[in-house]
Image: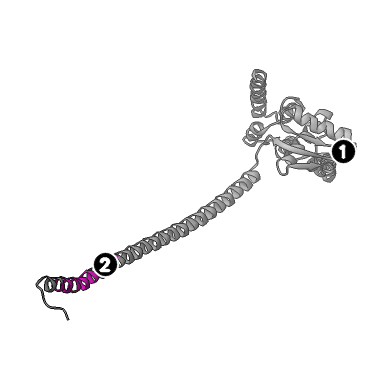
Amino acid sequence: MHRKKASTSMESSKLASLCALAKEGHVREAVVAAIDDEQLLFFGELWDTVQLVQVAPDQRPWEQLLHIFCFGTYQDYMTRKAVASQDVPDLSDGALLKLRVLSVLSLAARRRELDYATLRSALGVEEQRQLEDIVMECMHRDMLRGKFDQKNARVAVEYVAGRDASSEDTTHILRILSEWETNVASVISSLDGKRSSLLAAQQAKTEEVRRAEENMEQLQNEAKMTSAGAKGTARSGAAPSGASQKRGRTAQAGGVPME
């Protein structure tokens, strides 16, 4: 961990020196030193500095080369080389490897599986061993984490470090964020609608249960009243019969002759 922090500090120090060199008008020397340095992979600060400098016409090719290393790929370099080879500086073996490493990062940022055929085309290599060495260089620099699947000829990407962002990249990122915001708002709106529906259904169910309980209570009260009325009627009907029996017994006690 401490070694990584020291490396970052060293890279910052190197970039600061190269930016100072570019400010003095030595854009070519600054760019060559940056792309040939084994430790430097990100050049956004140097690019911003160069944009503030009045670049001499004979140094414009190195400005364009720096743009490729900041935001482009190996294929971008080869395309420009094919169109105007005299205006595109040659690269050392170390700079070519670095540009291929940066190209792998660009690919990995857009997809989670890198098949060997795509890598061969993007990096301009045919041998599988050379291709895997380039990917291993990314992993060694801790710019890429993943697993080789040699059986299926692909690399499964688990993590990739971001490159310098151009204005076009920033526009693309803002568009993605805007789409994401719209999607989130749509999901929230849908959830709110479902929540309202559930609450309405719950309230309707609660009201239904309340009415059922009221109806049940009313039926129970009516049943009680009906039962009480029936008992009262039964008691009223039994009283005359008892009185008649009492009079009969009285008559017998008085000695009324029986025929």
Task: Write the start and end of the magenta stretch as one range.
Answer: 224-248
Question: Is residue 60 in sight in this rendering?
Answer: no
Q: Are marks 1 and 2 in contact (CB under 8 Å)?
A: no
x 85%, y 35%: residue = 131
Q: Nearer the viewer, residue 223 or 47?
A: 223
Residue 113 horizontal side relative to residue 14, left or right: right
Give how far across and how far down residue 81 sits, in percent: 83, 41
Main secondary structure along the magenta-highlighted residues: helix
Asked if residue 173 is among those painted magenta in the image, a careful observer would answer no
Q: Earlier in the sequence, mark 1 or mark 2?
A: 1
Q: Quadrant of the N terminus?
A: top right
Q: Is residue 108 above or below residue 42?
A: below
Q: How is the image coloured?
A: one colour
Q: Residue furthest right?
A: 127
**Residue where numbered disc 2 is placed:** 225
Q: Mark 1 is on which residue type?
A: Val
> Is 132 left or right of 206, judged from the image as shown?
right
Q: Which residue is mark 1?
A: 125
**206, 235: nearer the viewer:** 235
Q: Nearer the viewer, residue 258 or 98?
A: 258
User: Which of the pair 163/3 is nearer the observer?
Assistant: 3
Kindly identify which numbered label has been placed on residue 211: none
Residue at mark 1 to residue at mark 2: CA–CA distance: 98 Å
Q: Is residue 168 left or right of residue 229?
A: right
Sort mark 2 into few (<14), some (14-19) or many (20+) by Cα contacts within 10 Å.
Answer: few
Q: Nearer the viewer, mark 1 or mark 2?
A: 2
The kind of residue tagged 2 is Met
